[in-house]
Amino acid sequence: MITIYLKQYNKIIRNADTELFDDLGFDDILWIDMMQPTIKEQKAVENFMEISLQTKQQVEEIESTSKYSETENAIISNSNFFVPTGDSFEVEPVSFILSNEGVLVSVRQAEMRTFREAEKRLQMNYRSFSTGYHILISLLEVRIDFDADLVELVGRQVSSLSKTITKEDSIDKDILLRLSTLQERTMVLRENIFDRQRILSGILRSERFPNDIYPRLQLMIKDVNSLISHTDFSFQRLDYIQDSALGLINIEQNEVVKIFSVAAVVFMPATLVASIYGMNFRVMPELEWVYTLPNGWNLPLGYIFAIGLMILASGLTMGYFRYKKWL
């Protein structure tokens, strides 16, 4: 799908007909926005602009020259934009090409709120967007505002996770998965905000942009730096939460080991008594300890004595542990 923004009758007009390129010049077109373009649409734009659109592999490269570069005929910039998906987000690369005549070409593969908001600004105050340079800066401004919203969202999720761990007595698998997911989101968010910083720095060094844009660039760079600081703080909080979670897990494991250790020690004297009376010696006087009841039944006192000795030994051991406050 292609959308062509035309400057006609002192207003901005949208059109999706590529045949307009045969009748219009660079002075008539402000912005060409392509979302999932067909091969026919790509060829039409390339022929009109006399440029080659970038491939997906070129857009996704991480080298600094692929993020922002200037040629004799155009300025090429590639940036990753976030597409919200519920409480998370996905990363979608977007390619921008600015001709020397001030026509902006954007190529993307997904619908994005950034472009809808930039289009609203363009329709509401078209006089502020005299060239494609101004539209590109507006797109980056909107994107930075949305980045700030995502940073705040991740910050709230980190705060919620911290409260959950504080209230919980034990750490389960779901909490660890939430922690790992938030760490990954924060890293991705920070990397892509750095991506925005690199593009703004490249634009700031350029001499092709109108002079009224550079003061806005200074403010945008300050905003990006503050977002980077905020994501660093969120990542530090996640490290602290991870340390706390690991500490709680170690405490739980120590409690389990302590229970098994105490059980083993408590039953050790009883096991010793049972081992002694389990020896097959020919002389075992307790075997002869028998008390005859009035009804003629024989009560084995040796057996009762052994059982009582086991209980007494275990009880004394337990009492000693409690005295030492080991339990």
Image (cartoon, grey):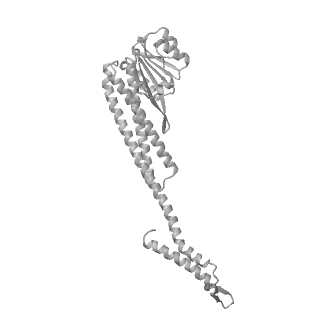
Closest to the observer, 130 or 194: 194
The residue positioned 34% from the left and 34% from the top of the image is 225
Residue 87: x, y in percent? 48, 39
The residue positioned 60% from the left and 82% from the top of the image is 304
- Judged left or right of residue 230, residue 271 is right
Relative to 239, residue 109 above or below? above
Q: Residue furthest top?
A: 23
Relative to 249, residue 182 above or below? above
Residue 150: x, y in percent? 43, 36
Residue 203: x, y in percent? 36, 23
Q: Quadrant of residue 155?
A: top left
The answer to whether any part of residue 154 appears in the image is yes
Q: Residue furthest bottom?
A: 294
- Judged left or right of residue 140, residue 314 is right
Closest to the observer, 116 or 9: 116
Q: Residue furthest front?
A: 282
Residue 31: x, y in percent? 44, 18
Relative to 176, residue 127 above or below? above
Closest to the observer, 256 or 215: 256
- Judged left or right of residue 311, residue 222 is left
The residue positioned 61% from the left and 86% from the top of the image is 285
The answer to whether any part of residue 125 appears in the image is no
Q: Residue furthest right?
A: 296
Relative to 261, residue 210 above or below? above
* Total count of labels: 0
